[in-house]
Image (cartoon, rainbow, N blue to C red):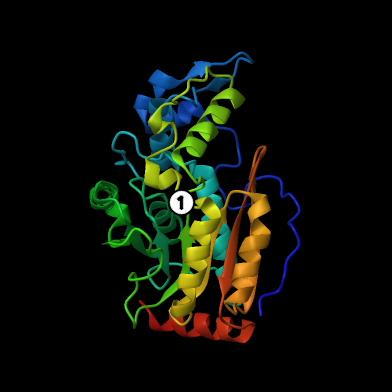
Amino acid sequence: MAQKKQFPPVKSGLHPRNLHRERYDFPALIASHPALAAHVFNNAYGDASIDFADPAAVKALNAALLAHFYGIAAWDLPPGYLCPPIPGRADYLHNMADLLAASNQGEIPRGNAVRVLDVGVGANAIYPMLGRAIYGWQFVGTEIDAVAAKNAEKIFADNPALAGGLDLRLQQRQGDVLQNVLYADEYVDFSVCNPPFHASAEESAAGSRRKLRNIGKPVTEKPLLNFEGHSHELWCEGGEVEFIRRMIRQSEPLAGNCLWFSTLVSKLDNLPLIYAEIEAIGARSLRTLDMAQGQKISRAVAWSFHTLAEQAGWCERAFQSRG
């Protein structure tokens, strides 16, 4: 039975291994991606910055970060698709690496022996890119959007350093999260997911307006669609809780195929419902991974159907037998 966990304390700062703990060095980033220069200006405090409400500026910043820190030079998005914050996404992977290390005699497993399931790769392919570049991991990725899937595959094809890092599978059924993804004899060491946070298009638009207000930008009734992403990336019926509930329920039949299931959880108030759902399916281990970037607090929840001894046995077998 899963152990109940109290609300986590706030953890300040990014993970110690995160390459983005310091302020952005814009001259260095521009040297790696010259197109960023057109979007950089001195703000009211005399510091170099960009307009974070401008999708083109945010995309240029992401391209510069990927090129400068990870050697990923060829990266682009189709118009209107989600452009994720790279520091926070990297933090999620570093925390999952620590979770694996805890069952692997304290050593982070690296290279092709580690296999990760990314539920909803997106056009940006952020988790497979970072996981491959930082740790050399292999990813199985799912996606319901053919345009997004094609772009993710193009990113991997255009960057030799990412070669062999992504096996992308198109999810045919809208309501499925983990069903019809893995083969019966296929194993992954953990899963990651950035679920749709909102319950409707209206709620998503309201969230965009709040973000615009927070950064002092004019608010319109219909914010730019590409400020956040396409509809299936942002909202689903029932919102974050319902999506994660489906994921939890669909994880039970795959208990033997995955060591750790995990997902981001945007709203602290959703944790009790998620914990109860995990307990109800008989998970043996439950972890909440606390993350912070500046004033933004986030978290991921991870669960496993394996005891501590079984987790250690999994790692010993998996990382010795796979190549």
In what quadrant of the picture does the N terminus appear?
bottom right
Which residue is at the front of the view, 230 or 89? Answer: 230
In what quadrant of the picture does the C terminus appear?
bottom left
Q: How crowded is the residue under tag 1: few (<14 C-alpha within 10 Å), some, or many (20+)?
A: some
Residue shown at 71% from the left, 45% from the top: 12
Q: Is residue 75 above or below residue 31?
A: below
User: What's the amino acid at mark 1?
Assistant: Glu
- Please give left or right for residue 285 compared with residue 28 in the image: right
Which residue is at the front of the view, 6 or 273? Answer: 273
- Please give left or right for residue 290 compared with residue 112 in the image: right
Asked if residue 175 shows in the view, the reply is: yes
Q: Is residue 228 above or below residue 193?
A: above
Q: Position of residue 252 (x, y in %)?
A: 49, 77
Identify the residue position indicated by label 1 in the image.
237
Asked if residue 136 shows in the view, the reply is: no
Q: Is residue 307 above or below residue 51?
A: below
Tag 1, which secondary structure?
loop
Q: Position of residue 67 (x, y in %)?
A: 38, 40
